[in-house]
Amino acid sequence: MPASCQFATGVHLLALLAQSPAAFRTSNEIAESTMTHPVVVRRLMASLQEAGMAETQKGPGGGVRLSRLPRQITLADVYRAVKTSEPLHLPHTPPNKKCPIGQAMHRILEDIFTGAEEAMIRELARTTLNDVLENAMHPSSSACIPRVT
Amino acid sequence: MPASCQFATGVHLLALLAQSPAAFRTSNEIAESTMTHPVVVRRLMASLQEAGMAETQKGPGGGVRLSRLPRQITLADVYRAVKTSEPLHLPHTPPNKKCPIGQAMHRILEDIFTGAEEAMIRELARTTLNDVLENAMHPSSSACIPRVT
DNA sequence: ATGATACGTAATAATGGTGGTTACAAACAT
DNA sequence: ATGTTTGTAACCACCATTATTACGTATCAT
């Protein structure tokens, strides 16, 4: 895959944890459901933990569980916690030094990229993990995802 | 570079063309300013042309120029014209067939991705190519980019 | 007509990010 | 103590993207 799918995987992981909020699930169990590798799960969990969405317990009987209620976790939180790259990118090679347009372009595009990403985050903030879980459990109720307010 | 920088390059190209709206510029000239390859410029121009933003003229004295006024081209137009991949991605490997959450996840995430991208596009639609050019020429006037209405 | 210029595009190579995997250390329950 | 589970570094394989080459096509000047 081209860009990162960590956001998708992160939402998936959290939805699995939200099914049994009090219980610890091992990274092996979760990796089996998401068809990924336990280390990938643990890597993502490290980010989610740092953001205060999950907590881990080592040793037998341990694993991972949510540390907040599913309704208190928005997809914007997940996005920010696990994102590793920007949705829009500047070119690798810097512009020609002699071109005044090129010189200004970098700064202008960064502003635009920031605004665009913020708009995306605002949209993601409208959906909570609880909305996702409910939609997953009762898909027939509505074609659209429930949203906050 | 990880993901595509075509949007950034596309805006840059159009801004260069907007400097002299009536004149044809060659892909070599433009490639020199943007520090990329003439073929890359022509590839992008093909997309911009298809979207009705630019027109080309072969042969001596030919090249590329805008086919619309800079104020009639929004960054959302550019984004849609040159985009080759989505800002958010599903995982490569499908989820475990036995996991009901995984089965629903794909559909739910696609809805969420669509909404997020649409929000980003709405934000991009607020800036025109003319705004970008003015900001590039008079950077001191304001730190932020002028926006439509 | 002829030649020079410039776009159009297919094919290939080079680059670099991303996820998968292995390996091993650290922590914890029993 | 022992076995289980997370934490993390290191490395590998894969794949998307850009750069580059090559060649065809259209257009203009002469």
Image (cartoon, coloured by chain):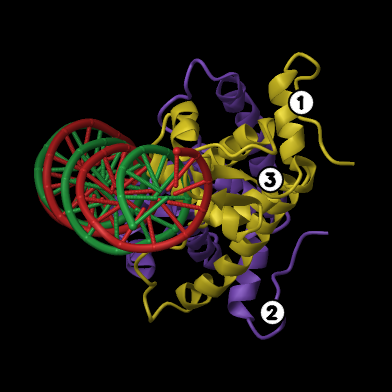
Chain colours: A purple, B yellow, C green, D red
Distance, label 3 to label 2, CA atoms, is 30 Å
Which residue shows up at 48% across the image and 54% down it? A10
* Residue A21, horizontal then vertical, whole percent: 55, 61
Q: Which residue is mark 2?
A: A143
Q: Which residue is mark 3?
A: B75
Output the chain of dot 1.
Answer: B
Q: Are marks 3 and 2 on the same chain?
A: no
| Vertical comparison of B109 with A61: above or below | below
Q: Of the residues shown, which amino acid type is indicated by label 3? A: Leu
Q: Residues within 10 Å of mark 1 (few under 14, many from 20)?
A: few
| Vertical comparison of A57 with B136: above or below | below
Seen in the image, is A59 located left or right of residue B67?
A: left
Distance, label 1 to label 2, CA atoms, is 39 Å
Q: Residues within 10 Å of mark 2 (few under 14, many from 20)?
A: few
**Mark 1 vs 3: CB contact within 8 A:** no
Output the chain of dot 3.
Answer: B
Q: Are marks 1 and 3 on the same chain?
A: yes
The image quarter containing residue B75 is top right
Distance, label 1 to label 3, CA atoms, is 15 Å
Q: Of the residues shown, which amino acid type is indicated by label 2? A: Ala
Q: Nearer the viewer, residue B122 or C26?
A: B122
Q: Which label sits in the foreground, 3 or 2?
A: 3
